Amino acid sequence: MPTIQIKNLYKSYINSDGEPTNALENINLEIKDGEFVCVVGPSGCGKSTLLEIVAGLLSHTSGEVLLDGVPVTGTSRDIGVVFQDPSLYPWRTIKKNIAFGMDIAKIPKQEQEERLTKYISLMNLVGFENKYPSQLSGGMRQRAGIARALVMNPKVILMDEPFSAVDHLTRCTLQDELIRLRQEEKKTVLFITHDLNEAVYLADRVILLTPRPGKIQQEYRIDLPYPRNRDDAFLTHTAATIMTDITTGSRKDDVEYYI
């Protein structure tokens, strides 16, 4: 059974003018256990809306989302979420920020320490545990945000453009660390991005959504082993193909978002 099943999903809402707006339309997607899936599409196509629905943070109009066959009706410890802004508490140290969810869940202190040691090491945060967020770079803060999600040992990691606010070199480093973590932890990942090169470099599959209302326009399989070469001809060709498909179905300003 797939880890995530999205069946006949629709999402609509009332906009500021009082008119109904369709955000997502008839989304059907299955993500298998341990699979890494990226969702791309023009600005405003509903990528983040889809992620928030899967996370249980946002209701949907019709259809269903299942995690291991069980309907998602709200937030769950089985689902970890990482956003573009890690939103760390400025008055808590990095270690205490990472431990926040475990404190809420009342996980025993000894187990907390074991998990903290593991994920602080995995995310290359050793030596920064007692620093405050303001003392760290954007990339280091994002590492802490990822560690905070992983330390709860979720089955699924949902990531909404988590590397878009950092510089290119840091972004490449974080991408490689995410691949390493995914291979070590065997997690299922749903990753939202507008960076096509990032999508094809990271994912087993890339899902392209149409302009609003977001529907699945195309699926691309990335059948390359890890580690991957960023300049691999297949990856470059696939990113170009996705760009072409976006161009044929989007407005000019949507396309420029990717350039």
Image: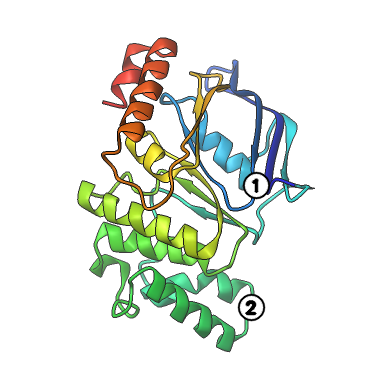
Residue type highlighted by circle 2: Lys
* Residue, disc 2: 106
Residue at x 45% of width, y 26% of height: 41
Name the one closer to the observer, 181 or 58: 181
- What is the total number of numbered labels drawn onto the structure image? 2
Dots 2 and 1: beta carbons under 8 Å? no
Give the alpha-carbon distance from disc 2 to disc 1, as whole Å: 22 Å
In the displayed structure, 105 sits above or below 64; it is below
Classify residue 254 by image quadrant: top left
* Residue, disc 1: 56
Q: Secondary structure at mark 2?
A: loop
In the displayed structure, 38 sits above or below 113; it is above
Q: In the shown orientation, is residue 174 left or right of residue 207?
A: left
Residue at x 67% of width, y 45% of height: 4
User: Which numbered disc, 2 or 1, marks the residue that appears first in the sequence?
Assistant: 1
Percent position (x, y) of residue 84? 39, 48
